[in-house]
Amino acid sequence: MSTSITGTAAAAAPASPKAVQRAAQLPNKAVALGTLATTVATKWQTSALPALLWLSKADFAQQVADFVASHAAADDAGDQRSPQVKRLKALDQLLDKGLSFVKGYLHEAYDDDEAYYGEFGIEKRNGTYLLPKARPERVKALEKLQAALLKHKFDKKKYGTAHWAPLATEYTALVQDTLEASGERSQKVNTKDRGEAQVRKALRALIHHVKANYPDAWEAELRGFGFQKESFGG
């Protein structure tokens, strides 16, 4: 007669350890981080808690102010760029639509119409002949297209010079503006990211600073400084 060991083995098997859920030390979002850091900087200024060896209270307050300002500047730069990007997308659609008619003119005028595409700034992409996808290259292609319209006497047609000139002028100006705006925004985002890293480093150090100076009452002290989490990584 066999003896079942299933029950015994199950009883002897150790229980799987439960994952420990720790509260995040600091907010993930930059806006919430700036709000917390501003509160902490203000509280620290009047607190008995001394300065860190590598960071004074005044320097931390300045770091926080610079971070909040740089975050706002990066957001503003992104907002200003959005209408330009939206308009460029609309113009891209208009340019692609107009190009189909120019290709039609070439097809009517020449047996080997594709041989002339290069003069009009048209290139082959994924098996289809289109204007370049990259916008700076598309600007150059529009210059070639307008010159070719004159050369091949398509300039008086419906989708001739009168159609392309205002579109090309607006498109060129917007591309230049967005390139400058993108560069400016990249610089502002980079400044914001560096400032955020500094602020996070200082806040984490302050958490440990509070714990070291108030070993029996650190939770209450942290809440007093503005940290509202009950746990800061143990």
Image (cartoon, rainbow, N blue to C red):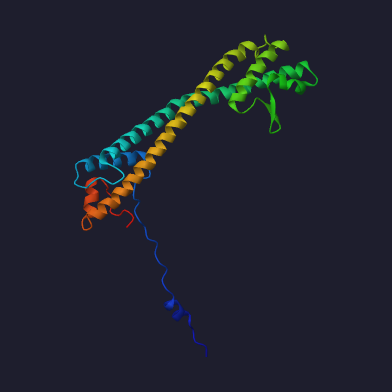
Drawn side of residue 231 relative to residue 1, left or right: left
Q: Is residue 41 left or right of residue 1?
A: left
Q: Residue furthest right?
A: 111
Q: Residue at x 34, y 53 (%)?
A: 23
Q: Is residue 139 left or right of residue 153?
A: left
Q: Which of these two is toward me, 35 or 96?
A: 35
The correct choice, above or below, for 9 with respect to 40 in the image is below
Res. 67 image quadrant: top left
Examine the rendered structure and indicate whether residue 201 appears above or below residue 184: below
**In the image, 16: left or right of 178?**
left
Q: Position of residue 5 (x, y in %)?
A: 48, 82
Q: Residue furthest bottom?
A: 1
Q: Above or below — where is 222 with respect to 129?
A: below
- x 29%, y 46%: residue: 53
> x and y percent of residue 175 in the render?
54, 22
The C terminus appears in which quarter of the rendering? bottom left
* Residue 142 coordinates in the image, percent (x, y): 63, 19
Q: Nearer the viewer, residue 93 or 1?
A: 93
Looking at the image, can residue 118 be seen?
A: yes
> Considering only vertical position in the picture, is 198 above or below 164?
below
